[in-house]
Amino acid sequence: MKIAAAIILAVILVFAGMKAYSFWGQEQQLSQSLAGIKARLTSAQVDVANLQSDVQYLANPLNLEKELRSRFNYKKPGETMIIIVPDQSSTAVSD
């Protein structure tokens, strides 16, 4: 009787140990997943802050006009646009 009880107890302990190890592995995997999600969240929050800053900057009509002129060569009717190309100097070093 004592041997059967010991065998049953041993089987139960082995089963419980396997489940505990399985739960530990899942916890490790979920912990890594959570760290990745937190990093993505932080990156997204930085992006949102940068976009809000850009929106606030471009809300000023003078800043918006300045950006249109610099990015898209925008000009007002009657204005003449001059594009100055810098001199190309040979600063490349050959081995």
Image (tube, rainbow, N blue to C red):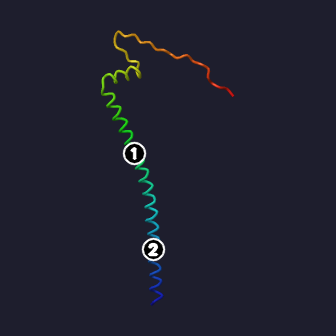
Amino acid type of the residue that numbered disc 2 sits on in the rendered structure? Phe
Circle 1 sits in a helix, a strand or a loop, which is it? helix
Q: Position of residue 28 (x, y in %)?
A: 45, 60
Task: Give the mark, 2 or 1, whose residue is nearer the N terminus.
Answer: 2
Rendered image: mark on residue 85:
none
Q: Position of residue 4 (x, y in %)?
A: 46, 86
Name above or below for residue 20 compared with residue 51.
Answer: below
Q: Quadrant of the C terminus?
A: top right
Q: Position of residue 89 (x, y in %)?
A: 59, 19
Residue picked out by circle 1? 42
Dot 2 and dot 1 residues touching (CB under 8 Å): no
Identify the residue at image location x=44%, y=77%.
12
- Callout 2: few (<14), some (14-19), or many (20+) C-alpha neighbours within 10 Å? few
Spatial CA span between label 2 and label 1: 41 Å
Residue closer to the observer: 10 or 32:
32
Rendered image: mark on residue 15:
2
- Indicate which label's residue lies in the foreground, 2 or 1: 1
Identify the residue at image location x=43%, y=61%.
27
Q: Quadrant of the N terminus?
A: bottom left
